Image: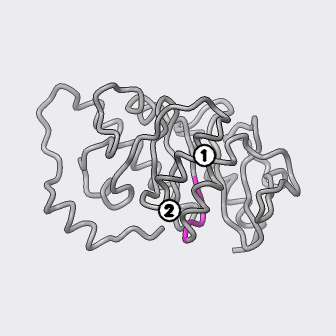
Amino acid sequence: MSEAKQRDEIARLAKSLFERGLTFGSSGNISVRLDDGWLMTPTGSSMGAIDPARISKLDLRGTHISGDKPTKESFLHTAMYDQRPNAGAIVHLHSTHSVAVSCLHDIDHNNVLPPLTAYYVMRIGTLPLIPYFAPGDMDLARAVSEMANRHHAVLLANHGPVVAGKSLSDAVYATEELEETAKLFLALQGMRTRPLTDDQVTDLRKRFPTQT
């Protein structure tokens, strides 16, 4: 896919996420890997109104070379790309239900959400919780990097998900699946639930191995 088409796809999918309430205000950011660097949504921009021509471009060293200034969370993206060479895109949102789960006290920090559906297992697998760091803190990048070689999706405490995919559409679909599973998880609080068994999860992982 040409760079121009990738820019258009970023703008189109960002608008779709915004219009469906998965991101709001100027929150959230998207990046796509290029042969010579990355495209990233600009800082302070609404994902509902991304201008493809003004999307930030960074070189392979992470230096901003064209477009508007990149998202201030660009270091989250580069930290994950460094650990996941097959990742083609990353989506980071402040989606309501995922953030709500990240604020809960009694959750498993090694795997935040139970395997409620097959598609959650297929698209997310396991979801570790990254401890809270203030926005812009480089220790957050280090914490993400430590997990990213084993997980293509992580949940930042009191912040939101960061999800890598082989392609941008893969990353978006996985992020949507995470948000819907978080919504289910919250809706089922206080009820007896029947998540998938360990054998069912193992079978799904064999049938649908992670591609990033």
Q: Is residue 86 left or right of residue 34?
A: left
The residue under the point 83% across, 44% down is 69
Identify the residue at the far right of this view. Answer: 66
Q: Amino acid at mark 2?
A: Asp
Q: Nearer the viewer, residue 10 or 93?
A: 93
State the image quarter where residue 71 is shown.
Answer: top right
The disc placed on residue 170 is 2
Q: Earlier in the sequence, mark 2 or mark 1?
A: 1
Magenta-highlighted residues: 86-90
Q: Secondary structure at mark 2?
A: helix
Residue 69 part of the magenta segment: no
Where is residue 185? Give x, y as percent: 28, 36
Q: Does the magenta-highlighted stretch encompass residue 88?
A: yes
Give the residue displayed 52% in from the left and 58% down from the top.
164
Label 1 sits on a secondary structure element that is helix
Taken as a whole, is the magenta stretch helix, strand or loop? loop
Question: Which quadrant does the N terminus fall into?
Answer: bottom right
What is the CA distance from the residue labelled 2 to the residue labelled 1? 22 Å
Q: How many marks?
A: 2
